[in-house]
Image: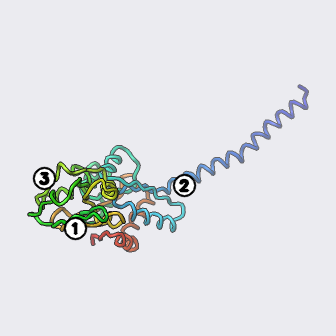
Amino acid sequence: MNRKNRFSGKRGGALQKIMCVPALLLVMVTMLIAGAAHSGDIKVSAAASLTDVLTELSRAYEKIHAGVAIKTSFAGSSTLAKQIENGAPADIFISADKDWADYLEKRSLLNNTTRVDLLVNQLVLIAPLNRTPSITMARDFDLLASFSGKLCTGEPSYVPVGKYAKQALTYYGWWSSIQPRLVGTEDVRTALAFVERGECALGIVYKTDALMSKKVTVVASFPAESHLPIVYPGGLTKNATAEAHAFWQFLQSDAAAEVFVRYGFALTQ
């Protein structure tokens, strides 16, 4: 190789290195932007009965907070609490009963200084639309004889709506006799779906879930004294971000309260 070619080769190599610098900067900037967008993510784990209302509130919040993305996960409170215990990422946890909030708090996974009883709900008995049995909410009423088929609700051993249902059925003296015909589901929305499809002749769900469906009718409401208060406690997890703290405050605002009430929830204060 002559001197000219050797020089050209060196200059060409240097030129390639110089040309790579803008490309490298572009990659770095892209990574920084992606990282910033990711840091704005807020991960919310909430009881299945909050699916519709929290979806609306999340979208509304995103519209007025550029760069913030709210990632929601809805399931039974027990399922979500176990997931968080096993390392699933979450900034905010909202349960449909106090037990599962207590469960995470005792394990130092829920920040007790941010814990708030956010909402209240009611327990109702539902049936498929146009297939409503006549039921009297009284201790001397024979519930088993009033319908044929199954009764669906959350699994009473760990799903909040199922726990409340067991308390209410026990209150009326119906629990022992109904157990052979009881179908326990993983969350309240699954129980609702079974009744909507007619796979269960009756269901026990929250009032807010019944209001969301056009395929069921409310047969009766369980009185407050028949079960423990249906309270939704929530709070920030131990690794919650500043963005999550701001969203949690928003969910406690008057603006959010109006939306919760529109979906049939009651406020704790």
| Tag 3: amino acid | Ser
Secondary structure beneath label 2: helix
Q: What label does residue 221 carry, if any? A: 1
Disc 2 and disc 3: Cα gap in Å?
57 Å
Q: Quadrant of the C terminus?
A: bottom left
Give the residue pinned by disc 2: 36
Q: Give the residue displayed 35% in from the left and 46% down from the top.
A: 83
For label 1, the SS is strand
Q: In this rendering, which labeled residue sits more in front, label 2 or label 3?
A: 3
The residue sitting at 15% across, 67% down in the picture is 136
Q: Amino acid at mark 1?
A: Ser
Dot 3 alpha-carbon crowd within 10 angstroms: few under 14, some 14 to 19, many 20 or more: few
Q: Give me the residue at 39% from left, 52% from top.
A: 90
| In the image, residue 128 above or below residue 12 | below
Q: Residue 177 got which mark?
A: 3
Q: Upstream in the sequence, badge 1 or badge 3?
A: 3
Q: CA distance from mark 1 to mark 3?
A: 20 Å
